[in-house]
Image (cartoon, rainbow, N blue to C red):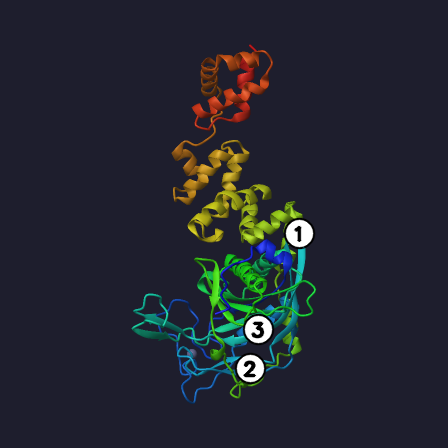
Amino acid sequence: MTTEVAHLVPFDEAVSRYEPVIGLETHVELGTATKMFCGCPTTFGLPPNSAVCPVCLGLPGSLPVANRAAIEYTIRIGLALHCTIASWCRFARKNYFYPDMPKNFQISQYDEPLCTNGWLDVTVGGQSFRVGIERVHLEEDTGKSLHVGGATGRIHGAEYSLVDYNRAGIPLVEVVTKPIPDTGALAAEVARSYVTELRDLLRALDVSDVRMEEGSLRCDVNTSLAPPGAAEWGTRTETKNVNSLRSVERAVRFEIERQAGLLDAGLRVVQETRHFHEDTGTTTSGRSKEEAQDYRYFPEPDLVPVAPPESWVAQIRASLPELPAARRARLQATWGLSAENMTWLSNASALDLVDQTVAAGAAPADASKWWLGELATDANRRGIELADLPITPAQVARVTALVKVGTLNDKLARQVLEAVLAGEGEPDEVVAARGLAVVTDDSELAAAVDAAIAANPDVAAKIRDGKTAAVGALMGAVMRATKGQADAPRVRELILQRLSE
Ligand SMILES: [Zn+2]
């Protein structure tokens, strides 16, 4: 197959010789209580086939009824993305056969989406990009197949397959961007930033729990390359079901490196769907041409058209919450942090946490420092989101307060945070139990200072001669002797005082 290539062109070189164009199709599971066309619950983790009824099982004679909340959520998303909301549109039947789809068709929207022609701004490396939104449409999810007995979990080699229809009929929204040109070397980061910004927007709108790891937000990533100045964009590939922010970035990078390798060798990029592999960061060819589907779309005859009255749309518009970009600007002005710092916070999903830590009394810079530093490192190590760490903003605020009054220095604060994360209790309990407070007791410090001077007579002599820069060596000795718990400025004072006597 010519779609696989032996050599990859390093990313930086590839984007210096070819113009990437990216595009993203994001599927969002809506957080409604019931399914799209029936009253079955959408609760996650129910026993297989316990949340089903004649409608979502596609039994003969059953009729769907559209879920008003799902339509309202879709309009909320459309309005927040500056889209035009259709005054009249229809659902469409997308025909194909698959075991996890009991009706043998999926109800979706085709040429009459509910929301069209919007935009979302993203910032990468201080540069702003306006990503055009082609459409936002509503559809139902399919069921889930489980292939048992094989080594790979795929149908090939499996002994038998099970199907769970609990997911069949769960409302999904698909947000499709227009092609995004002119991103150059920032293409992969723009893709990631767009999905991050969209995720934050959906979370603020309270329409989905947007958990990528549970599949409630997943992306198809389109990538193409063209020689600079070419009249047309290159042939695009579509990498399906990418399910983490990091993978979105890696998928774009890999496709650019792979396609540049093909073009360099004088080969053609084949228009196809591809799969992304988390373990290797590569993509492989998915669906081949002879499997390409003709979905034979037609307007869904069992549903009335969707015609949201203007007054309802206006009411939804008026109820939109403060959106992430506006909130970031407001918080930045209040907190006095740099734009770069604010970008780091939103990319790490730490804005809410810092906001709550500040509300609990911490200085914004301190709250930002701990959440982006020590705590982000720990969350990374555990492979979880910052918000899922076993520590509360109030506990972080308490640690910053203990630093501020001099009970802790940064090194000790780190130990206290580690202990709280390890479940050893509240910060004050940890400080008491571990005896971690900074030693400010002069008599205790004086003994350590005297010992350090006695052990380093040559350093002491230099300081007596006025070379005060040497004081660092003695401070180091005192800090070691007190296991880092001494108050450093006080130690310095005591050493200089002693040696000037
Ligand atoms: Zn049902």
Instruction: Indicate the amino acid at tag 1.
Output: Gly
Instruction: Indicate the amino acid at tag 2.
Output: Phe
Instruction: Indicate the amino acid at tag 3.
Output: Glu
What residue is drawn where x is 43% and y is 89%?
A: 61
Answer with the quarter of the image where residue 127 lies. Answer: bottom right
Q: Sequence order check: which comes first, mark 3 or mark 1?
A: 3
In the picture of the structure, the residue carrying the numbered disc 3 is 72
Q: Which mark is residue 391?
A: none
Q: Sequence order check: which comes first, mark 2 or mark 3?
A: 3
Tell me if mark 2 has few (under 14), some (14-19) or many (20+) residues whose alpha carbon lies within 10 angstroms of its own.
many
Q: Locate residue 440, reporting x and y percent.
A: 49, 25
Q: Residues under labels 3 and 1: Cα distance?
A: 35 Å
In the rendered structure, the answer to whether residue 239 lies left or right of residue 117 reads left
Looking at the rendered image, the disc whose residue lies closer to the viewer, 1 or 2, is 1
Q: Locate residue 150, reporting x and y percent.
A: 31, 68
- SS under mark 1: loop
Quarter of image, ligand 1? bottom left
| Label tally | 3
Q: Which mark is residue 91?
A: 2
Q: Locate residue 109, reporting x and y percent.
A: 56, 79
Q: As drawn, which residue projects farthest toward the top?
A: 501
Observer able to see residue 361: no
In the picture of the structure, the residue carrying the numbered disc 1 is 126
Dot 2 beta carbon under 8 Å from ligand 1: no
Looking at the rendered image, the disc whose residue lies closer to the viewer, 3 or 1, is 1
- SS under mark 3: helix
Tell me if mark 1 has few (under 14), some (14-19) or many (20+) residues whose alpha carbon lies within 10 angstroms of its own.
few
Q: Residues under labels 1 and 2: Cα distance?
A: 41 Å
